[in-house]
Image (cartoon, grey):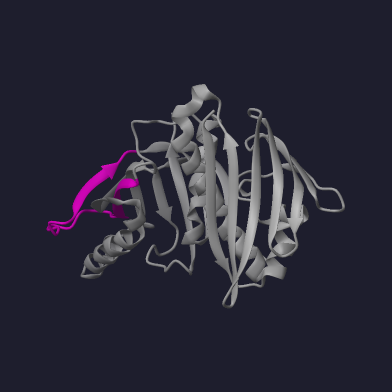
C-alpha cells in the first residue's frame, strides 16, 4: 500500500510550554483547525479531559482523534480515524523544539492509500501539506495573539456584471506569484494615476487562467475595471471585457498569508458539488481593498467561481 507522509513546520513566538498546552488539549482545536474554518455548523465533541475529539460536518466529513502518547512540552501523538467521506487511519503528531525567542513546531502525518489509489499519492501529499500549512498559520495566530486573523463569509450565488478592464498577464511559479502580482498592480495603478484615475469603476481583481499546484505553475491576469479604455496602452498591458456571469462567492477578511483558506473553501465546495462549475470560464479573485497591501496587513477579498 502506498505510504503517505506529510510534515510541515512553523516558528511560533511562544515557549514550548505555552504551545504544548494548545496542541495537547482538543478544546483548543476548534479555534484554529484548518478544516473547521471551511464550514460553519460542524458538530464537535470533546470530553472534559481534552484528550479525545470527534467531529461531523456536511463538507468536512466525520471522524475522531485521540491522544496516544505525550512527552510533556516536547511531543504529542494521536490516532486519527476518518469515517466519512471514506474510512481511513493515520498517525498524527506534533514535535516542539525550543528556539531563540520561541518554538519550532513540526506537524506530521503518516497514512496509507489502497494500492489502486497509488496515482493519488503526490496529490494527497500536496493537498494535505497545504492543509497543514494553513493550520500552522492559524495555530500561530492563536498561540501568539489568542485569536484567529482569518474570517470567511460564505456568500453563495451572485451575478457579476459585464466588466471592461485593463490587465497585465503573467506566467510564473506559484512561489513568485505574490511579488509578481504586487509589481503588476503597482504598474497598473501608476498608469491609472497618470490622468486615467477617473476611468476606474470598481475594485481591482485577478483572473486565474491556470493554477497547477503539483507543478507549481500559475498563469493569471492582474486587472483594473474601467469605463473605457485609454487611447494608448503600454505594450505590457491589454484590454478585454468579462461577460455577465453567475458566480459562487466566498469572502475573506485577514492577512493575505491566510488567503489559502478562501481557495480551500471554494475547492471543497466544488468537490462536494455544492455548485456546478463552468469550466469554460476562469475563477476571479476580487480585492475589496488595495491589493498592494503587504502580507502582514489586513486584506478583504473574495473568490468568484463561475457556475452554470
Residue 223, given in percent of the width and then of the height, sits at 30, 54
Residue 127, given in percent of the width and then of the height, sits at 49, 42
Q: Is residue 295 left or right of residue 187?
A: right
Magenta stretch: includes residue 172: no
- Residue 265 lies in quadrant: top right
Is residue 245 in sight in this rendering?
yes
Q: Is residue 229 left or right of residue 115?
A: left
Residue 305 vertical placement versus 289 (above, below): above
Is residue 201 in sight in this rendering?
no
Q: Quadrant of the N terminus?
A: top right
Instruction: Give the magenta-colored segment's residue range.
Output: 216-243
Q: Quadrant of the C terminus?
A: top left
**Residue extending furthest toward the top:** 116
Magenta stretch: includes residue 235: yes
**Residue extending furthest toward the right:** 48
Number of marks in the rendered image: 0
Residue 264, given in percent of the width and then of the height, sits at 51, 44
Residue at 37 percent of width and 31 percent of height: 279
Q: Is residue 276 left or right of residue 171?
A: right
Closest to the observer: 93 or 265? 93
Residue at 52 percent of width and 24 percent of height: 115
- Residue 91 lies in quadrant: top right
**Residue extending furthest toward the bottom:** 101
Residue 121, given in percent of the width and then of the height, sits at 47, 34
Closest to the observer: 135 or 17? 17
Amino acid at each position: 500500500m502506498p505510504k503517505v507522509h506529510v510534515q510541515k513546520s512553523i516558528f511560533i513566538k511562544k515557549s514550548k510550554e505555552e504551545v504544548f498546552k494548545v496542541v495537547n488539549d482538543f478544546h483548543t482545536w476548534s479555534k484554529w483547525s484548518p478544516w473547521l474554518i471551511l464550514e460553519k455548523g460542524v458538530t464537535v465533541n470533546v470530553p472534559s479531559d481534552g484528550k479525545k475529539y470527534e467531529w461531523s460536518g456536511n463538507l468536512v466529513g466525520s471522524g475522531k482523534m485521540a491522544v496516544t502518547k505525550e512527552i510533556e512540552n516536547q511531543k504529542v501523538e494521536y490516532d486519527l480515524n476518518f469515517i466519512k467521506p471514506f474510512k481511513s487511519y493515520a498517525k498524527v503528531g506534533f514535535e516542539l523544539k525550543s528556539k531563540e525567542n520561541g518554538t519550532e513546531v513540526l506537524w506530521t502525518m503518516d497514512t496509507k492509500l489502497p494500492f489502486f489509489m497509488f496515482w493519488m499519492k503526490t496529490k494527497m501529499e500536496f493537498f494535505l501539506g497545504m492543509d497543514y500549512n494553513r493550520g500552522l498559520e492559524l495555530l500561530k495566530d492563536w498561540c501568539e495573539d489568542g485569536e484567529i486573523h482569518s474570517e470567511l463569509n460564505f456568500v453563495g450565488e451572485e451575478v457579476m456584471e459585464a466588466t471592461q478592464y485593463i490587465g497585465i498577464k503573467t506566467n510564473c511559479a506559484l512561489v513568485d506569484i505574490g511579488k509578481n502580482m504586487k509589481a503588476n498592480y503597482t504598474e497598473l495603478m501608476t498608469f491609472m494615476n497618470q490622468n486615467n484615475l477617473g476611468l476606474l469603476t470598481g475594485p481591482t481583481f485577478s483572473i486565474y487562467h491556470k493554477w497547477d499546484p503539483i507543478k507549481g505553475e500559475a498563469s493569471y491576469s492582474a486587472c483594473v475595471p474601467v469605463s473605457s479604455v485609454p487611447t494608448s496602452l503600454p505594450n505590457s498591458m491589454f484590454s478585454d471585457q468579462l461577460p455577465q456571469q453567475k458566480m459562487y462567492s466566498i469572502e475573506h477578511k485577514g492577512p493575505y498569508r491566510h488567503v489559502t483558506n478562501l481557495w480551500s473553501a471554494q475547492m471543497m465546495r466544488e468537490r462536494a458539488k455544492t455548485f456546478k462549475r463552468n469550466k469554460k470560464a476562469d475563477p476571479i479573485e476580487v480585492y475589496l481593498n488595495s491589493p498592494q497591501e503587504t502580507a502582514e496587513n489586513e486584506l478583504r477579498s473574495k473568490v468568484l467561481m463561475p457556475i452554470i
